[in-house]
Amino acid sequence: MAAQIPFVGRRWPLFAGVLVLICVAVVALALARGDEEVRATTTVAVSAFPSPGDAVASPKTQISFRGVPRSELGTVRVEGSDSGRHAGRMREHPDGRGASFVPDEAFEAGEEVKVDTGLTIRGTREGDFSFTIADTPARSGFAVAPANELTKGDGEVQRFRSRPDLQPPAVEVATREPGTARGRVFLAPKGGQGQDGPMMLDDRGEMLWFRPLSGTDQAADFRAQRYQGQPVITWWEGRIGIGQGLGEGVILDRSYREIQRVRSANGYTADLHEFVLTPRGTALLTVYNPVPRDLSAVGGAEEGIAIEGVVQEVDVETGLVLFEWHSLDHVKPEESYYTVPREENRPWDYFHVNSVNVDTDGNLIVSARHSFAVYKVDRTTGEVMWRLNGKRSDFKMGEGAAFAWQHDARRAPNGAITVFDNADTRSAPRPAQAVTTAKESRALALRIDEAARTATVERTATHPRALLADHQANAQPLPNGDTFVGWGQQPWFSEFAPNGRMLFDGRMAEGNDSYRAYRFRWSGRPQTGPRLFVASRTDGSIDVAASWNGATDVARWVVLTGPSAGRLRPVTRAPRDGFETTISVRTREPLITVRALDAHGTILGTAAPIETPAG
């Protein structure tokens, strides 16, 4: 034993050192698992929203991180200058490329929020950053339209004996030339006689599908899109005030089954102007957000309110925010052409965001009506990459290329930027600086040279009636090179060939308008079956009125009669003739029904049999 003591003594410093290292590692592991102040580090650049330095975040904001998986984000420390330390949950984004810190409690208006991380955050040096919560305005920016703007017009209403619950406004197609693109016409009529709601038509103007909305709700931006790889139809639904709306996005599948309602996050309510689904399972939404602002530098009140435009990208299933952009953080009020009010606390809609689309490189194209400008926005940082038109245009606008009060900016398949140039407006104060003297609206395609920074007119299209769309409207590039135009405040919708020749033109009944109008290919098969109505005629025959709301592939109807539901046989048939087809038959059988066939004779559906008038 005595001989071993020197040996132990010689090994003890080494053993003790190893023991200390093990203890340190255990403690560090415990801290990493239990203390939220311990931070992971990564050299991959991570985007944060709200972004570093943002000044108008919502009190109910999430703090979203994009660029790496949740496992590489570690933990964060969030502290408000007034509200103190915030606990919360880190919720992973479904695509595996980020997560959102969702605080347990809201932040306080006007406070600074500090976020400590061990990450490489874009826009910072050390990975830590701060943003500011917007103050609460004295007044909401939402204004209800005056009573005279809500009154119904005198236009005609469609009525159907088989579907008395459907009473949409009448539609007339005046021009149908060969060469139009394939697809259905998508409208969302509102404001006139009859019911408001999303409506789908064929090229004759005959209704294919209609969803009446109840109460004061209206629809906007009705279109066909894709969600999770499948075709869907979507629209925005809610209350519409002066220039904006409060509502949510609606998604229906091919059987017209509602599969999702999409809401803005961070305490905001989605505006009517845009509802775009992206291939990564997200939705692009717009928000109108009133913020207290000193407007004396632009001729307004010191205690003013600026309504900013907010763009959100929200995961459809979880509601988590993947991107958020505020115009006040990137576009100064001085860029606006909209006259600023001098009264205190009167909201000023300086920006008026009215479209957001994904560009070919994944960044965003944003249109602002009141700055007469289209902005390309970096989807990772929120920075403005360029401005097209307006007071600070990065492009030299060629002859006839300037536009005003525009809507619906997007990248066309051929690389052009298309917009609907409203040109002039009677509903807004005139700008002090005129940009265009045009007195009619137009669909406009601009050839953009991003290297030379030039914008030249590629083509335009105007209506033979020289329509001036005071507000709303869109210009949709079609796969065959045509352009489909919704004339907004005006009740017309049209399709133009590349040379500007009108191929198709229709209009809704007087008093109606549709925020946008589109053409999309769509095939729908409702879960519900066909409907029928029967009535006796004086000559002893029976009129059978058949319809099937949303069944787009019906080519003909077959009438069946018989003594019982199991013993019905066909007695006559007729081609589909509009939404409701009326067929005259003679029968003494007690039961009658109708069956829908497609162009190949395949049975699509059969209505529940009802008693004949003679039965």
Image (cartoon, rainbow, N blue to C red):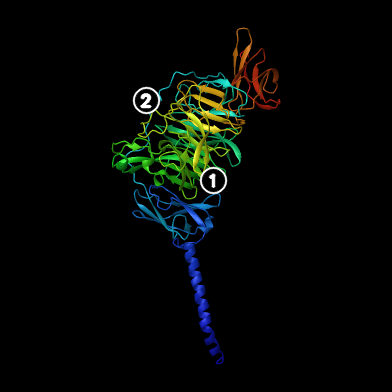
User: Is 261 in front, or is 542?
Assistant: 261
Asked if residue 422 lies left or right of residue 3, the reply is left
Mark 2: which secondary structure?
A: helix
Give the residue at mark 2.
147
Left or right: where does residue 304 sit relative to residue 275?
Answer: left
Residue type at mark 2? Ala
Indicate whether 22 appears above or below 12.
above
Q: Position of residue 403 (x, y in %)?
A: 45, 34
How far from the left and from the top, in percent, is residue 23? Answer: 50, 73
- The correct choice, above or below, for 549 with respect to 272 in the image is above
Mark 1 element type: loop
Q: Cα distance, mark 2 to mark 1? A: 43 Å
Total count of labels: 2
Q: Which mark is residue 362?
A: 1
Whether label 2 touches label 1, CB < 8 Å: no
Q: Is residue 76 visible?
A: yes
- In the image, farthest residue toward the bottom: 2
Q: From the viewer's perspective, is 71 left or right of 140?
A: right
The quarter of the displayed image where residue 368 is located: top left
